[in-house]
Structures are given as structure tokens and as C-alpha cells.
Amino acid sequence: MAFQIVGTGRAVPEYILTNEEVSKLVDTTDEWIKTRTGINSRFVSTHETITDLAAAAGKKALEKAGLDATDLDLIICSTVMAEHASPSLSCLVQKELGAKCPAFDINAACSGFVYGLDIADAYISMGKANTVLMVGAEVMTRHVDWTDRASCVLFGDGAGAVVLQKGDGLKAIHLTAKGDDKLLSIGNTFCKSPFGRQPVLDPHFKMNGGEVFKFAVGAGLKDVKTVMSKAGITSDDIKMVIPHQANLRIFQVIKDKLGLSEDQVASGIDHYGNTSSASIPLMLDELIEQGRLVPGDIIVMTAFGGGLTSGACVIKL
Ligand code: ACO
């Protein structure tokens, strides 16, 4: 375990889409969305690109760390879909920031930020990097079918970033994957080819909400217990659990089963919605900015989503 978080940053689009406005697009109500998910509003990109958001979050994280982009040894961006298949989002962030280091993207859907932390830890542990920028950036509102009320109400856009340097902040980390394209998927688009049949995949987000809910609760609880045991901590040691912001009801199950208080579970789903792999770093930066998390606090991050993937970690700030 090799890193310490030395800076955090976040960026969201300007436009705030309320439940009231969503209910003018599809057959839903503010009441349904609030009670089933905890969401009141979400940020939706209009003119901002995913690169704008990722680079802005990265820049703020570097500023808070008191570092320059040229100090970076590696940039990792987690996203389900960048603007281009190539160049990667990370390369475009590197260009925007004026960094000189290697850069690559990863895709582990909503678990991508925790997966990225594990990779960063390996690089720093091996001595291959001293300073790593890890960004979770998503524009999920571009991947939903805005006529499907079951999914379009859930998502928002944004980016969160952390700068990591050698240290002993990471106490435990655990990842899982269970390949499945039935419960949750977003199709890719391909160019036409004269050779063979090409897969025709729906580019819209598709989810069996009920089954994914069960997976999320089960995986989240199991992963958190695993990392708490690895780190040798109890619920009393935890200042806050930051769950992937998918559904308020998932947080409530995690809270009750782990015997945590309301204050020990971070929730920003009311104003962010589900921002996939951006959700944990967005929350982390907000909580640090509000002074609700301070150096020395022990936090647990838990994420779950498409793949199906999941991951959790214990970090001392
Ligand atoms: N407004 C009004 N009614 C709706 C809406 C809506 N927006 N959406 C669905 N309904 C209706 C359904 O049609 C259904 O009606 P019926 O009973 O007449 O058939 C009823 O509401 C119940 O629908 P469910 O899908 O059973 O609702 P549920 O309580 O399961 O909530 C939700 C749906 C919010 C999606 C929930 O299942 C959930 O949060 N799942 C987990 C999501 C998650 O964890 N995602 C993480 C991964 S996301 C990622 O990786 C990018």
C-alpha cells in the first residue's frame, strides 16, 4: 500500500436539470424519482465536453496539491466512453494540463475510480511513478435514452480527480469482476465493414434495475467488510463511507447492515444523480471542501456497476 491523497478537485457542467424538468420529457414525477432514488437534480453537460470536465477537475486537484502538471508521472482517467476511441481521454487531459507523462484510460464502469486507485498504487509501489493524477469523468446523460423513464432520470455528468503521491494512506483495497452483459450494458458503435455481420448494439444505457440493485447491495456490503477486515478497523473507526452514488436506498442498506450512523455515509445523490465513476471523487472533494473530512480521517470507498464490477478501499486521509 503506497499512496497518500495530496489533492482533490471536481468539475460539473453549468446546467442543472431538476426532476420537474425531467417530468416534462418523460412520464415521471419528482415524487417518484425522489422516493425511489434520492435524486432531486443533476448536472447535465450542454456545451462542456468530457475532456473539459476531466481537465478542470485535474487542474483543481493539482492546485490543491500545490503541484504543477509537469510534476505528474502518470495520468489515469476512468470513463465508460471518452469523446474518441482514440486519442484517449487521458491523453487529451495531459494535453490540456500541459503534462508530459504517460496517460491511459480504464473502463470499469461505476467501479472505475476504485480500480484506478489500485493501478496507481501498483505504479507507486513499484517505484514506476511518484505522482499520479487519477480522474473519474463521465457524461452519462449522453448515453441514456431520453424517452426511457426507467433510466434517463438516474444520471448526471461530472468529473472528480485526486493527486496521489508516495505515502501510507491506502490501508486496504479489494476489486471484483463477474462478466455479464445482460444486467447492464451500453453498446458501442462501429463503422460498416464489407466483411461478415457486424454486431448491432444499442448505444443506449440498458439496465435491469432490480437485479443490479441486489448486486450493488450484496457486492458493496461484502467488499466493505473485506477491506475493513484487511485494514483491521471497525465501524467506529470510520469517519465516512463514500458509496458510489447510485441510489439512496443502497446507502441505507449499507448503513443499517454495518451499524453506521447517518453522518457516516456520504450522500450527494440529491444534487449529482448517478455520475458513474465520477461519483466517489466528486463526493470526496466536496466533503473535504466543506471541512467534513480532514487529514487523519479514515474513509471507506465502495463502488459497484457495469461489468459487473465492484471494488472498495480503506484510506486514511
Ligand atoms: N417514473 C415513474 N415510474 C417509473 C419510472 C419513473 N422514472 N421508472 C420506472 N417506473 C415504474 C416502472 O414502470 C414500474 O411500474 P410497474 O410496477 O407498473 O411495472 C415501477 O415504477 C417500479 O419499477 P422498478 O424498476 O421496479 O423500480 P425500482 O424500485 O427497482 O427502482 C431503480 C428502479 C431506481 C433503477 C432501482 O432499481 C435502482 O436504483 N437500481 C440499482 C441501480 C444501480 O445501482 N446502478 C449502479 C450501476 S449504474 C452504472 O454502472 C452506470
Image: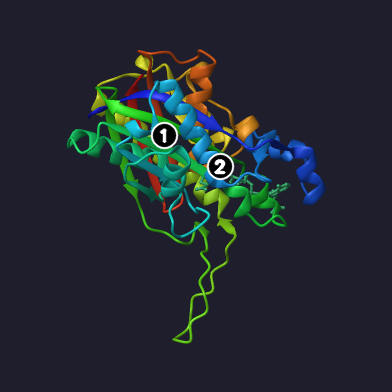
Q: Nearer the viewer, mark 2 or mark 1?
A: 2
| Secondary element type, mark 2 | helix
Q: Residue at x 34, y 36 (%)?
A: 117
Using the image as rendered, state which of residue 8 and residue 229 is in the foreground.
Answer: 8
How many C-alpha atoms fall within 10 Å of the one at disc 2: few (<14), some, or many (≥20)? many
| Residue 280 in sight from this viewpoint | no
How is the protein colored in the picture?
A: rainbow
**Who's the residue at 79% across and 45% down the image?**
23
- Residue 199 falls left or right of residue 17: left
Q: Earlier in the sequence, mark 2 or mark 1?
A: 2
Q: Secondary structure at mark 1?
A: strand
Depth check: give the residue in front, 210 or 271.
271
Q: Residue at x 56, y 49 (%)?
A: 210
What amino acid is at disc 2?
Asp
Q: Please give the label number shown on residue 93.
A: none
Which residue is under mark 2? 52
Which residue is nearer to you in this view: 236 or 283? 283
Which amino acid type is marked by label 1?
Thr
Residue furthest left as drawn: 126
Q: Tell me residue 197's x, y (percent).
A: 48, 83
Mark 1 burial class by Cα count in 10 Å: few <14, some 14-19, many 20+: many
Q: Nearer the viewer, residue 222 or 120?
A: 120
| Above or below, comparing residue 160 to residue 144 in the picture | above
Which residue is the extreme one toward the right? 24
* Residue 156 figure quarter: top right
Q: Which residue is mark 1?
A: 302
